[in-house]
Image (spheres, rainbow, N blue to C red):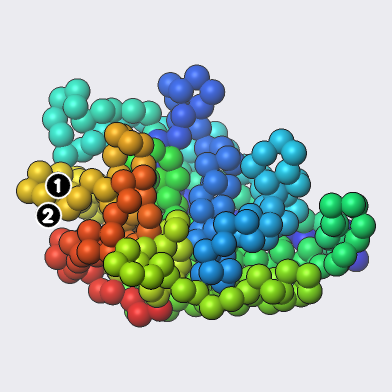
Amino acid sequence: MSRLHKVTFDCEVITPMFLGDSTGNKAELRVPPLKAEMRFWLRAILGGLVNQDSNKTAIIEQMIMGGIKDSSNQSNIHLRLFTKEDEVQSGDKPMLPHKSGKKSAYNNAILPESKFKVELKTFANSYKILNRKGNIVAVVSKKSMFDISLQLFELTSLIGTIGQRSNRGFGSFNIIKMNSELVGNHAIENRIKATISGLSNKLELFIRSTGIYSEFLSNFNINGGHIRVSKWPIVHSDCFKISIGNETKWDLFIESLMRNIHKELKDKKLLPKVLGGFKPRQGSTMKVSMIKAGDNVVPVFTNFICQTALKPKRKDYQNILNFPVDFHNAKVIAL
């Protein structure tokens, strides 16, 4: 019997990835940005299961993917990324294609059609949960954590992005084997819904299997009163909306997307407090990813109704929630 659970995914870059190397001058495919995006979606799913409790979310996250501090547990899931020199191309691309000249901010990127492999693995044994005194209080299967990681990686490939400007469609990648199954928007919709549902169910079963943490599970209750936004980006029908657009060319789409967002910000239809910015530094509550469709792509919009540094209220999200439909006639998915 094998001592390891291991799966390798063949992946393809769909839109330019602005991922700097150690010098910051040349793009390089690396594990940390990919793992960070997987953490983002793990926290988003967990938040809906443990009713926005950050401490409970951190405990489950650390068991599966390890902590982010030196004193935290190591990850039970190990990621490795492999590339071949002749399968990865890089070149300069504009990070702000809706602008001209130097303002378009050309930077080195991993180019579309580049190929890479991602290996996920864990040891085929059990994981012991210890209390503060170091005593064993529960034992869980690493296989269940491994199965969660596989579905988490699949979700990341569908609606996740990595690198700079990734919230605007850059940094998309797909699992090559999955491309043949995602023919048409209906197939894309069904796969996204099934992956979110499957991941949520696997996480719930895993939390219950711990025994000691089963009480973490509770019904989601968004903040009351006039605020009614989640504490962080969370995948739940009360504070999350996902829409699928129409086939298009990725470069034309991203340029048009950025131009339209810039115009609506200028016209004050969209608000910086939900779209992100530098003062204070915060990410956008709307993410856009791309799924390959032959020579074209299908954009997928994910909108979170969540707290940001500028403390928006529910009403501040009205226009950005409508943006995918107004801009690209996107179809909203019912979760």
Circle on res. 269? 2
Q: Is mark 1 on a helix, strand or loop?
A: helix
Other-residue count near label 1 (Cα within 10 Å), few / some / many at <14 / 14–19 / ≥20: some
- The residue nearer to you, when weighing 185 against 331, is 331
Q: From mark 2 to mark 1, how far is it between C-alphas?
A: 6 Å
With respect to residue 103, does 44 lie above or below?
A: below
Q: Is residue 112 left or right of residue 207?
A: left
Please report the residue visible at 69 percent of the width from the left and 53 percent of the height from the top: 62
Asked whether residue 307 appears in the rendered view, the answer is yes
Which residue carries the number 1 mark? 265
Q: Which residue is drawn at 56% across and 52% down?
A: 39
Q: How crowded is mark 2: few (under 14 residues within 10 Å), some or many (20 or more)?
A: some
Relative to 272, 286 lies left or right: right
Q: Which amino acid does label 1 sit on?
A: Leu
Please say if 7 is above or below 49: above
- Numbered mark located on residue 132 in the image: none
Where is residue 219? Give x, y as percent.
54, 78
Image quadrant occupied by the N terminus:
bottom right
Q: Give x and y (percent) for residue 173.
A: 44, 52
Picture residue at 23% right of the left edge, 69% below the top:
330
Badge 2 vs badge 1, beta-carbon distance below 8 Å: yes
